[in-house]
Amino acid sequence: MDGRYTNIEMNFANDHLQKCSMSCEQKTEYSHVGELCTQPGFEPQSTSGRESLYRRTMVVFISLWIITLIILGAVLSVSFLPGSGLQNEMTDLQRMTSSSILEIQARLEDKNKQLETKNRENSNLIQEKSGLQNQLKELQMRTSNNISGLQVQLEDKNKQLETKNRENSNLIQERSGLQIQLKEIQMKTLSNISGLQVQLEDKNKQLETKNRENSNLIQEKSGLQNQLKELQMRTSNNISGLQVQLEDKNKQLEIKNRVISKLILQKFDLQNEVRELQTIAEDGFAKWTNKQGIVRQEVWKWIRKAAANVILDPRTAHRNLTVSEDGKQVTFSGGLLPDSPLRFSNWYGIQGKESFSSGRHYYEVQVGTRGCFSVGFVKESVEKMKYTVTSESGFLMFILEKNVYKVSTTPPTSLSLNEPPNNVGVYVDYDKGQVSFYNVGTRSHIYSFTGYNFSEKLYPAVNSCNSMTSGPLIISPVSHTA
């Protein structure tokens, strides 16, 4: 029983495949590639053909399932029959039938996949073929156009060639005529050459005569050129000497002009200073000696014009002081510098590098809000090992000490200021024996030492006291226009 049902299924499948093969073999050409039928001019099936094939395949597949259900019904009916032998035979038949169906289904699915692949390939080939056919048509059209154009050009070139040949024939005839004329001219030229040779010999003789005359003229020209060079050299030397003298005179004149310009400026400055001095004399500078008050603008400018570039001398600084590199600031640091007889030992002070022994001089010191300082001048003979800050010992100073302002007179004189100064101006008129102090911020006079007959050098001097929290004393730049 199992062999019979198996053969039925196999015969059905084989019969279906043979029919497909026979239908293809009956065509004019047959290709086994992909199991497709092809013939000249034959194109693969269209979309409707593929749908028809798909429907037939599904009919086959459904038929197989119907057969399978019939067999399963027969098996179930037999299973109620007595006897274990029949049941075993039925079980074997079911197993063999199931395996056969699965095998046929697998082969059928494989064939369907191959058929779909070949259909896709055929579609691509059809598209490529259509593209190539279009390209071929375009190429044929272009080639046809090119051939027509080339034929037209060829005909045009032939016409041009015929024209050129006719022109060449004319040129050949003209050349023959010219050759005949050339021979005639050559004959005539030979006779003319003989006459010209005679004339040439005559001209050569004349040229030799002129050359001799020219030679004499050249010699005379050379002599004149030599004389001219000697004259030019003598003239050049004279001109060079005159140019040197002229340049020297110009330089002297420029120097004189600069000197005159400086003298004119000095004259104007002196005239202004005279006027300022007259104003000061009229106003009475002496009245400000021991009085505080606002200094007139003209007097203030006149004082500040005497500004000096004060640079502190670190060799004279107390051992606990630190001086900036530019010599414009001094601070109490607490460190000990090497001892020296040039240093102040009992006074936390320092003096400037430059001394004054004549004229007027002015500098300013920024003291800020510190509680202790001294600014002013010291005499060259001051004793640096002692601590006696009075005018008799050589100190002409304005002092703030223990919140009390005073000056180093003998004995010291206490001052009552309307406004504490943040920037102190120090002025000396050496020739008049006067040292004065000013509050720069308010442009007011603080105090003046007067009536001194200075006979030794005076040095700018400042004292920062022994305070590490007050900041530095700073020599401030002076504006001449303020």
Image: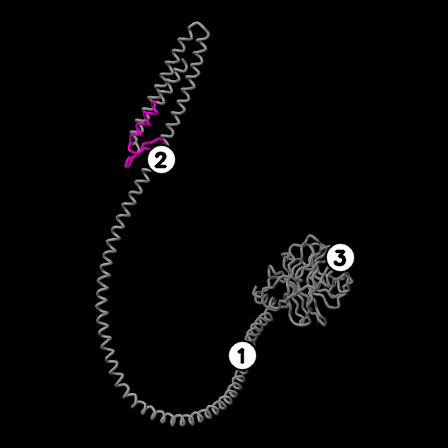
Q: As shown in the figure, which amino acid type bears the numbered disc 3?
A: Leu
Residue 254: quadrant of the picture: bottom right
Relative depth, front residue between 238 and 358: 238
Give the magenta-colored segment's residue range.
15-42
The answer to whether residue 480 is left or right of residue 355 is left
Q: As shown in the figure, which amino acid type bears the numbered disc 2?
A: Glu
**Label 1, on which residue?**
254
- Based on the picture, tell me whether residue 28 belongs to the magenta stretch: yes
Cα separation between marks 3 and 2: 105 Å
Relative depth, front residue between 467 and 313: 313
**Label 2, on which residue?**
121
Q: Position of residue 97 (x, y in %)?
A: 41, 17
| Secondary structure of residue under mark 1 | helix
| Residue neighbourhood size for the residue with mark 2, other residues' Cα within 10 Å, grouped as few (<14), some (14–19), many (≥20) | few
Q: As shown in the figure, which amino acid type bears the numbered disc 1?
A: Glu
The answer to whether residue 143 is left or right of residue 435 is left
Cα separation between marks 3 and 1: 57 Å
Q: Is residue 39 visible?
A: yes
